[in-house]
Amino acid sequence: MGKRIRKLKKQRIHNEGIHALVSGFLFITSVAILLWALFDTKVPFWVFIGIFGVAYAILVNFFRCPIRHFGSDDVEKLVVAPADGKIVVVEEVDETEYFHDRRIMVSIFMSLFNVHANWFPVDGKVKLVKHQNGNFHKAWLPKASEENEHADVLIETPEGDTILCRQIAGAMARRIVTYAREGEDCFIDEHLGFIKLGSRVDVYLPLGSEVCVKMGQSTTGDQTIIAKLP
């Protein structure tokens, strides 16, 4: 029991979800009171509570924001997962917008039930932040990386490597929040941003990086090492 209590103390609600959760709670409470007062039978009340109670629980789970720390100060050359989810792409690609060369792309898909806070994958300095409007294809499709609405964050590590972290909107996700600011230092354990509803995050690494994950593997944001830079 003590272990579970300590685990629960590390859970909190992300600031991005406060408004939605408060509004949802007030709506459910108001309608529930009306149903209880207006109908002699309580069936409508319990049906409403059952359906919307489950929906609200899913919403609370979606906006969870666990308090995490990587657990080591030795992060030189390490790339840590920026998101909870599942590895859906590990491949070499031509990156033509920023690097104009071959890169290793590692993609993490986030389902509706994953934590949707995003963390910085490396220590370094933010060189560029750019938001690009686009489509809303299903996030796991290959074309989503370039055609979907996305936000790009270029980070230069203390060792001189530059990586691209791309937050991508999906078929349901319609809002990308990016906290990174150009010129600021960034660190593992800090939040890069938040994506509302299911989507994905791509990380573009220099060739020669040692990929430490495989297709289908689950990742934990700010915990799972996805690669070691060359």
Image: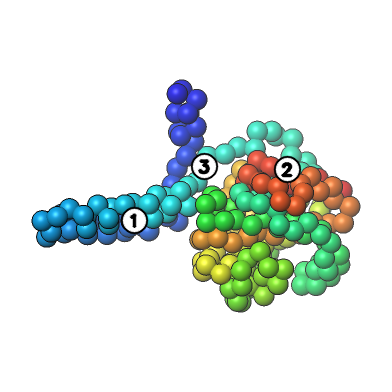
Residue at which label 1 appears: 51
Mark 2 Cα shell of 10 Å, populated few (<14), some (14-19), many (≥20): many
C-alpha span from label 2 to label 1: 39 Å
**Between marks 2 and 3, how big is the CA–CA gap?**
18 Å
Q: Amino acid at mark 3?
A: Pro
Cα gap from disc 3 to disc 1, whole angstroms: 26 Å
Question: Furthest residue to the top?
Answer: 2
Secondary structure beneath dot 3 equals loop
Q: x, y (%) of residue 226?
A: 74, 47
Q: Residue at x 47, y 29 (%)?
A: 4
**Amino acid type at mark 2:** Ile
Quick check: marks 3 and 1 in contact, CB under 8 Å? Answer: no
Quadrant into which the N terminus falls: top left
The mark found on residue 66 in the picture is 3
Point out residue 29 in the picture as x, y percentages from the top left corner.
24, 54
Q: Going by the image, does 40 lie left or right of 205?
A: left
Q: Amino acid at mark 1?
A: Ile
Q: Which residue is mark 2?
A: 225
